[in-house]
Amino acid sequence: MATIRTIRNHYYLDFYDESGKRDRKSLGLKATKENRKKALLEKKKIEYELGAGVYKERQKRIDNRNKLLTQGFDEFISIRKNASTRTIENYQLAFQKILDHFGDIRINRITFDEIELLETKLKQQISENSIASYFIKLKVIFNFFQSSGWIAENPIPHRQMNIEEPKTISRKDLEEILQKLKQRNRQHYRAVALLLLTGLRISELIRLTFDDIDFKENIMIIRNTKAGRNDKFPLYDDLRKFLIEEFPDKSGRLFDYKSRHSMKFFYKFIKSEGYDSYNFHSLRKTFISKLVNSGMSVYDVMTLARHKSIRTTLKHYTAAELSRMGNEISERVKMGNILGNQNETPLKKLEYGT
């Protein structure tokens, strides 16, 4: 059933597998008298497995035991065809930390202790939030390795990012930021100003084209690919004026930014100018907070902010806004009347003929 071959002074086995397909396997042995005995033993072993119908299953187990990190990661990525480019890039960045530390070794050689050493090393280079971000993605990758049977346990520990609530930007800081950006780089100024005027997310801003803006109907279409929907946004007067004045060429994309990474200018700017308590999301939060504090209804704010859940919108209602609503209850609803704590205005008695 199997035949020993000598090729380039090494032993190989030729045989037909269980499906009848011809196969050749290197025995990793030099063609010597001593190794001939080992080759014969391997030949008998394979012939037995082929006869018993267990050869493919054993080879699969061997392949799983010897699966390299890059081989496993390639399979992980191959099943995520619907993932965004940014998501894939983030997985690749996290996985690169593993490769840089271990090299392309077998997956089952990655242990809890080894990962602990990697984490200790990373703490000397990057922030704990960055480490947590990498580990969250690595845990997903190694969960796939575990479900594929390449490892018995996932060695990546659970880590959680400590995300600070973004701050709203004060009027004074906003004016200074916009003025400085306007003087230094017009495109950067336009991007930041538009984020402030609309509350757009970065991904939505980058995709925005003039085909999405209808100046006749005063509507802007915002494409949310993550949620798989298109939202409509009103082209209110100030926004309309800004777009007309700042974009003389109204065709194609509004901005040349290719990805979120190409907009790092803002982080560099706010750090150099002493505004490092803010970030891009601060612009969105400032926009939403201004809507809230204008007295606009929570449902209107939810629509304009394009929140999926009203609970997300309610988080933006500040203590000051809650105080305002409390005063509204006191003045309009007069709940104290129910408890007898306030003088209830008597109802006017209506008489026939009046």
Image (spheres, helix red, strand yellow):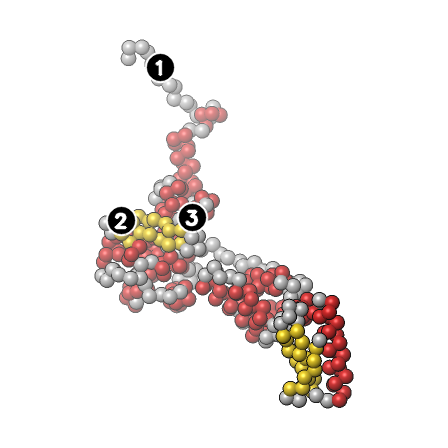
Residue 81: x %, y % from top left: 49, 61
Q: Is residue 209 above or below residue 330?
A: below
Question: In terms of secondary structure, where does tag 3 sit?
Answer: loop
Quick one: which residue is furthest to the top in this view? 352
Instruction: Give coordinates of residue 66: x percent, y percent.
Output: 65, 72
Distance from Cα at disc 3 to Cα at disc 1: 48 Å
**Eyeballing the image, is 112 above or below 284?**
below
Which sits earlier in the primary sequence, circle 2 or circle 3?
A: 2
Give the camera-side residue of 65 and 98: 65
Q: For the point 39% across and 56% down, which residue is it?
A: 201
Q: Which structural element holds mark 2? A: loop
Disc 2 and disc 3: Cα gap in Å?
21 Å
Residue drawn at point x = 53 percent, y = 58 percent: 162
Left or right, 3 with reference to 173: right
- Whole-angstrom CA distance, mark 1 to mark 2, is 51 Å
The label shown at residue 349 is 1
Q: Which label is found at residue 86?
A: none
Mark 3 residue crowding within 10 angstroms, few (<14) / some (14–19) / many (20+):
few
Three-letter amino acid code at the position of disc 3: His
In primary-sequence order, the first of circles 1 and 2 is 2
Tag nearer the camera, 1 or 2: 2
Nearer to me, 268 or 175? 268
**Residue situated in front as seen by the camera: 158 or 59:** 59
Q: Is residue 232 visible?
A: yes
| Residue corresponding to mark 3 | 307
Q: Residue at x 35, y 17 (%)?
A: 348
Residue at image mark 2: 218
- Kind of residue indicated by mark 1: Lys
Observer able to see residue 111: no
